[in-house]
Image (tube, rainbow, N blue to C red):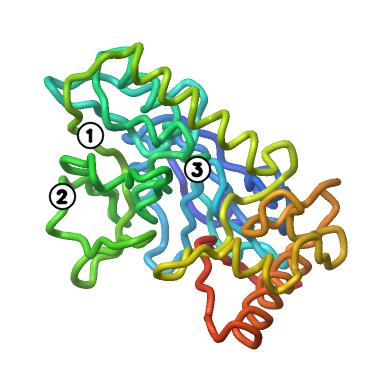
Amino acid sequence: MNMAEALPLHGLRGELRRDEPMSRHVSWRAGGLADRFFVPADLEDLAHFLRQLPPTEPLLFVGLGSNLLVRDGGWRGTVVLTHAASRRPRMEGDLIYAETGVASPKVARFAALHEREGAEFLAGVPGCVGGALAMNAGCYGGETWDIVERVATIDRSGTLAERVRSEFDIGYRHCAPKGEREEWFAAAWFRLEPGVGETSRAVMKELLARRIATQPLSLPNAGSVFRNPPGDHAARLIEACGLKAFGRGAARVSEKHANFIVNPQGAARAADIEWLIEHVQRMVYQMKGILLHTEVRIVGEPA
């Protein structure tokens, strides 16, 4: 039975859907259906929604879906979509405040507009603040948690809490709460140094030009699939194994950047992409003795 029909969900201002195609909400444009899909109007609406859910309800928070693969069998539970084009950062004293549904490049542009420097790299992070926090996203020498002053989290009871860096285990493309806490990022406050907006905009323009020149941005993809191993680059290893342009179904390793898997016609099954990820891992390990670890998150049920 549909949860929306089985539970007395009252007072929601957001939109609750059933059997939502996740291919519409991940940048790979592949994947199955979510049983339930909620788009909250704001954090208060999200808290009100969470308070009404059963404590065992499987939950998946999604922003722009730029680092996510949902298997073809879909998500047996509820997806919460945090991204909304209308969400904007704002100044709170000397800090920049942004909810997790704000696209990361908006934070970079907002910082430049307010004469702050240090967030330029976020212009090259193709996702939302929530995902950037969850994986300590970074590029071109910058990482998200380098500029975080504190964050807000929300738990299953809809309770908001403020937390600082010391309450998380943070590393390269990794962030996890210390202790056994089940909660999700709701917002972040960024501390940036005073700068020159024109200089920041020039840096962002250069970074974006480099991305366009080296990455297959015109094709559905999820960014870098694998973390770089210490002292090396995943793309170099994959290319050295002769895997550029290697494909499965409609998915293939990008000819432009070997650490990207693309879905050119949007026709690939999630299973094809997942098989290709595992094949690349297997071949690089066999030929180079290095196990590549994924940056992308794979969730859901097989078809």
Q: Secondary structure at mark 3?
A: loop
Q: CA distance from mark 2 to mark 1?
A: 13 Å
Mark 2 residue type: Arg
Between the C-alphas of marks 1 and 3, the distance is: 19 Å
Q: CA distance from mark 3 to mark 2?
A: 21 Å
Dot 2 corresponds to which residue? 163
The amino acid sitting under disc 1 is Phe
Q: In the displayed structure, does residue 8 sit left or right of residue 95?
A: right
Instruction: Kindly indicate the quadrant of the structure image that contains residue 220.
Output: top right
Q: Quadrant of the N terminus?
A: bottom right
Q: Secondary structure at mark 1?
A: strand
Residue 92, quarter of picture: top left
Percent of width and height locating residue 212: 63, 34
Please report whichever mark, 2 or 1, sits nearer to the chain's N-terminal start.
2
What is the three-letter code of the residue carrying label 3?
Gly
Vertical order, 165 against 24 (above or below): below
Q: Secondary structure at mark 2?
A: strand
Few, some or many residues within 10 Å of mark 1 (<14, 14–19, 20+): many
Q: Which residue is mark 3?
A: 63
Q: Is residue 217 in sight in this rendering?
A: yes
Does residue 210 appear left or right of residue 130 in this picture?
right
Q: Is 62 drawn above or below residue 121 in the view shown?
A: below
Q: Are marks 1 and 3 in contact (CB under 8 Å)?
A: no
**Of the pair 2 and 120, the residue shown nearer to us:** 120
Q: Position of residue 94 (x, y in %)?
A: 13, 22
Seen at 68% across and 81% down, the residue is 283
Where is mark 1, residue-wise? 190
Q: Earlier in the sequence, mark 3 or mark 2?
A: 3
Residue 164 lies, in percent from the top left, at 14, 50
